[in-house]
Image: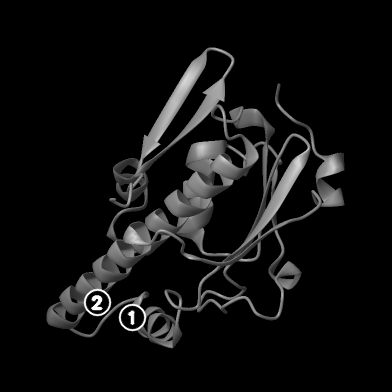
């Protein structure tokens, strides 16, 4: 038996399907967003499987509430779902439960993904988003003192990306939730 590594997500539009590979997210965010690319891929892949198990979800019906303000994750979510520009994305760092791992960018590693009449809450695992990750990102994401230090940091980010992508379950908790009421006032772009 082998672990089936999935490095893509699919969404539907009225005219057809769109497929986004991990490499698309990595190209969009660049080396700065290596970990964010993997996080976005694993989060959306799992959410789409939970919310629409038989076919890719309609892109314009996906809602995201995030407690994590990291710009590269926000960009990845936008690339796949267009939720940010279409009013189906809410940033709320205070919505995260107490057990969610904190982020060096502020907020927490907690997301709610909604589609049609379903919604699930995803809390990332502190086994991946641990103290070492927090300290490395806090100290080095905005720049390193030397090229050698930056090369070492990039190698570390690739190691976290590998751990994240190769994980069969990078989540601490996944649980049903209710779509945030603030989405009822936003418009869906049908």
Q: Is residue 33 visible?
A: no
Give the spatial CA distance, label 1 vs label 2. Answer: 7 Å
Q: Is residue 42 left or right of residue 176?
A: left
The residue labelled by disc 1 is 140
Extreme-top residue of the structure: 15
Which of the 4 quarters of the picture holds residue 84?
top right
133 w.r.t. 84: above or below: below
**Upstream in sequence: badge 1 or badge 2:** 1
Residue depicted at 44% across the width and 58% down the height:
39
The residue labelled by disc 2 is 153
Residue depicted at 39% across the width and 78% down the height:
137
Give SS at disc 1: helix
Place of residue 86 in the rendered image (x, y in percent of width and height, measured from the top left):
67, 36
Rendered image coloring scheme: one colour
Place of residue 182 in the rendered image (x, y in percent of width and height, measured from the top left):
84, 50
* The C terminus: image quadrant: top right
Q: Is residue 186 left or right of residue 45?
A: right
Are dots 1 and 2 in contact, CB under 8 Å?
Answer: yes
Q: Is residue 22 visible?
A: yes
Place of residue 169 in the rendered image (x, y in percent of width and height, measured from the top left):
46, 61
Place of residue 151 in the rendered image (x, y in percent of width and height, measured from the top left):
16, 74
Which of the 4 quarters of the picture holds residue 83?
top right
Give SS at disc 2: helix
Q: Nearer the viewer, residue 53 or 96?
A: 53
Q: Is residue 152 left or right of residue 21?
A: left
Q: Nearer the viewer, residue 47 or 59?
A: 47
27 w.r.t. 71: above or below: above
151 w.r.t. 17: above or below: below
């Amino acid at each position: 038996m082998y672990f089936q590594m999935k490095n893509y997500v699919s969404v539907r539009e009225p005219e057809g399907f769109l497929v986004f590979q991990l490499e698309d997210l990595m190209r969009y965010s660049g080396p700065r967003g290596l970990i964010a690319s993997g996080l976005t891929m694993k989060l959306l892949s799992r959410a789409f499987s939970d919310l629409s198990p038989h076919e890719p979800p309609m892109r314009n019906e996906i809602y995201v509430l995030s407690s994590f303000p990291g710009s590269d994750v926000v960009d990845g979510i936008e690339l796949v779902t267009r939720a940010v520009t279409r009013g189906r994305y809410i940033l709320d760092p205070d919505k995260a439960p107490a057990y969610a791992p904190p982020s060096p960018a502020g907020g927490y590693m907690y997301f709610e993904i909604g589609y049609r009449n379903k919604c699930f809450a995803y809390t990332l695992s502190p086994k991946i988003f641990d103290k070492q990750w927090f300290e490395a990102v806090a100290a080095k994401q905005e720049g390193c003192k030397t090229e050698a230090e930056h090369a070492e940091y990039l190698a570390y980010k690739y190691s976290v990306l590998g751990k994240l992508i190769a994980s069969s379950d990078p989540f601490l908790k996944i649980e049903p939730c209710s779509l945030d009421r603030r989405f009822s006032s936003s418009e869906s772009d049908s």
